[in-house]
Image (cartoon, rainbow, N blue to C red):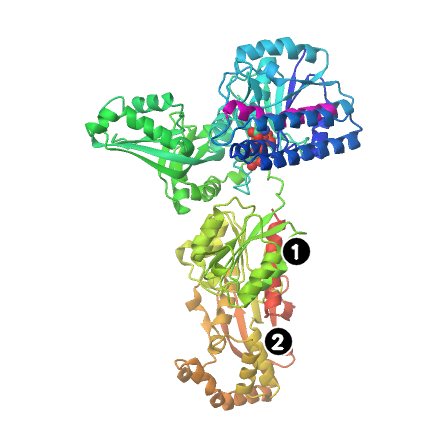
Amino acid sequence: MSRAISAVVHKFGGAALADAKSIRHAAQIVAARPSGAVVVASAMRGVTDALLDIAVVASRGEHRAALAAIDALRGRHLMTDAELAADLGQFSTAEVIDRGFDELSELVGQVGGGGPPHPALTDAIATVGERMSASMLAASLSALGVHAKVVDATRIVHTDARHGNATPDFVRTMSAVNEHLLPLVREHVVPVLAGYIGSAPNGAIVTLGRGGSDLTATLLARALNAHSVTLWKDVPGVLTADPQVVPNARLVPRLHVREAAELAYYGAKVLHPRALIGLKDETRIFIRPLADPESPGTEITTRRDRATERKHPVRAITAIGAQAIINISGDGMVGVPGIAARAFGALERVGVSVALISQASSEHSICLVVPSAVADRASDALGTAFTEQLQRQEVEGIDVRTDLAIVAVVGLGMSGTPGVASRLFAAIAEADVNIIAIAQGASELNISVVVEERSVAATQRAVHAAFRLDKIGGGAVAPTPNADVVILGFGRIGRELATQLGEVARSRALRVVAVIDSSGYVFESRGLSKRRLAMLAAAKEASTALADMPHGVRAGAESAISEVQRHALSRPILVDVTAGDTSAVLEAALVGGMDVVLANKKPLAARRGSSGGLTQSAASRGRRLLHEATVGAGLPLIDTISKLKESGDEVLRIEGCPSGTLGYLFGELGRGTTFSTALRAAMELGYTEPDPRDDLSGMDVARKALILGRLLGFDGEIESVIVESLVPDDYRDMPASEFIARLEELDSLWRQRVDDARSRDSVLRYRLMVTSDVVQVGLVAVNTASSLAGLMGTDNQFSITTSRYRDNPIVITGPGAGVAVTAAGVLNDVLKLAGSR
Ligand code: ADP
Ligand code: ASP
Ligand code: MG
């Protein structure tokens, strides 16, 4: 074919063809440059799944349900068609749609109950979606003034007879293209073909395997020697990982054809595994976002880019789930030639293709990875093939292990770059995931590991972070609309937060996907509704543990988190509103790719040791950790400190009263109330811990002070905080009840302290004082004219002295305790994270 024609193939993916609006948009893209265009259409989003489902439902004898599902699909198509007709004034395809669905009903009627439907029948059923969208797309093109024509794909794409996963016969397809397609292109007609469809040598309709319209498009491009083929998708291009699993996946602007093929082969859904076979250098291949046609997307090229390869030896990660390992082992295998060949031969005979093979150098065992669905068939075939070896005990066992996944890292630059494998394994180990098998192809283009399926998301995120793939330079993916929130802790603050989140969830595109308490958790991947959250909160209020509620699961916090992380959450955020030492849980969350919001002080005041603690761990993984509510509840204190630092200011010192409980107590003492009366009132109002000595010991304030100190660069642990306890030595070890009973004994001591202060024109306050060198908390007398003296009730106050605000520090005052303000502080952090990536 001469270059003068320059065919340009456009394929519109199902994900991109969701509704009338996107079909119109697709038509507009072609209409803008119709010359040489050849269009391939996928079924509308979800339609192929629905069709395959209908075949299965019918095969169970549930014809009525199948017919109802057909009606629903028919309705969706007719509605889309009507919308398009109204929009573009286009010629309606309602008749075509009705005919298609009538045919479908007939086909489904042929599915006998009992046993799966015949593959040929399933294929015929599955192709209805593509045929419908091709007509709608062609009609939209016509309405935009393009001379478009639907071409029956079965006349063009010729294949072998393998139903469900047919392979094109290039020679026959090429001649059909020359005969039927090329003349149209020459006459400036835009042919529109259903993707995914072909015809077997006997004329039966076949499908090219899931995602097969990618293959239709590249096959036609190859036959037409097209100038370019563009696969229009719902993603910005090929990303460094599946964005549904790794939220900070980046666009890869240029990908070598071998890398792309490897990704596709190892499960990256973005491209059909065989789509790149046989494409010529002259044909440029693009994967681009329908939503943003101006953006260049990813170009798949045959040119190498050594500089980028050196910088990013690993370009992308992918995974295939539902795999099984078959392990053939035995001492007698050592040194016996032909074992692997025999295994492969046996599997080939039963039509099982092996995704991965690994053999220990001792030759003591060979392990083969195959899809779980065919594991039994494969192991039976191997059992037969090795009958003699099993009898002679050269082979001792053929074992199958299921529920596994392959995670593959791909990149041309890996070849010859030392250390890639060790970095990979270290990252996986650090994510606490066990590697079950490893394989590296001789090309060194791919390293694959087999892990348990439940760890597959965590593995991908850890590896993505370890190779800094979020820095690959193609820009961030447009933010997905959702942030998924997991609430750890369902006490008063947790319940208030759940309620507040329920209120804003819809408008802020947030979902609360799980709540966890000490008994277990309740999880809902699509998000817990406002009503459901309210019900859970009410039940918890009435002392029912989450594990005992409907859909509750009994589990420790760590396994709850790992269970939650098995699901592909969108930009997950873990909120810790407990009061315990949750460091290990939070660490697991960070490793698993979650951002973290804390109201809980303990983990931030915990021993950091040489690892640098939680903050360091978050930073090294590129995760965000916000904790406004740990000091001063909802007051914008930590945010102010960060902003000052970001602006280049230096925070020299923070002074303040961060305890609502002690604030209240000293306010009362100042008014002349006795210590015992004031403390009892505070207890009654719920301002104190059950044992008021927890407040009086100063430890709570010390933790807050340490958190602030660490923000200023203080590198000590909690023991290096200077703490003045307000509990006299003799009163420290007695039971709480006794302490409370004997409060009056302390009245005179406090009376005297208050009077002393008053005689010096001062009042008592429990104050923290923090610099990068010293962190100290204790009782002070402050002048009645000072701002600290003016503090009322449970209000907190902080004054921040910086290089710029040296003489006149910044003062932040306001309610610093209470369930509602604390929850609001947490909510604010959650919204910040949700809106910021
Ligand atoms: P189409 O609509 O053309 O059939 P697909 O839905 O098959 O497109 O492919 C796009 C989907 O592939 C995305 O929604 C994304 O979840 C998934 N995906 C998996 N791996 C990647 C990757 N590395 N880059 C981009 N998308 C990926
Ligand atoms: N509609 C088919 C599928 O969902 C083919 C495709 O989308 O490429 O697998
Ligand atoms: Mg696809």
Furthest toward the right, the residue is 89
The residue drawn where x is 70% and y is 30% is 23
Quick check: marks 2 and 1 in contact, CB under 8 Å? no
**In the rendering, at what x and y percent does residue 605 appear?**
47, 63
Q: Amino acid at mark 2?
A: Leu
The quarter in which the N terminus is drawn is top right
Assign a secondary structure to mark 2. helix
* 513 in the magenta segment: no
**Ligand 2 falls in which quarter?**
top right
Given the image, on which type of amino acid does mark 1 rest? Val
Where are the magenta residues, as a range? 118-139
The answer to whether one can see residue 72 in this image is yes
- Identify the mark at residue 788; answer none if there is no mark: 2
- Within 10 Å of the Cα at label 1, are there few (<14), some (14-19), or many (20+) other Cα atoms? some
Which marked residue is nearer to the observer: mark 2 or mark 1? 1
Kindly identify which numbered label has been placed on residue 47.
Answer: none
Q: Which mark is residue 504?
A: 1
Looking at the image, is 295 positioned above or below residue 804?
above
**Dominant secondary-structure state across the stretch colored magenta:** helix
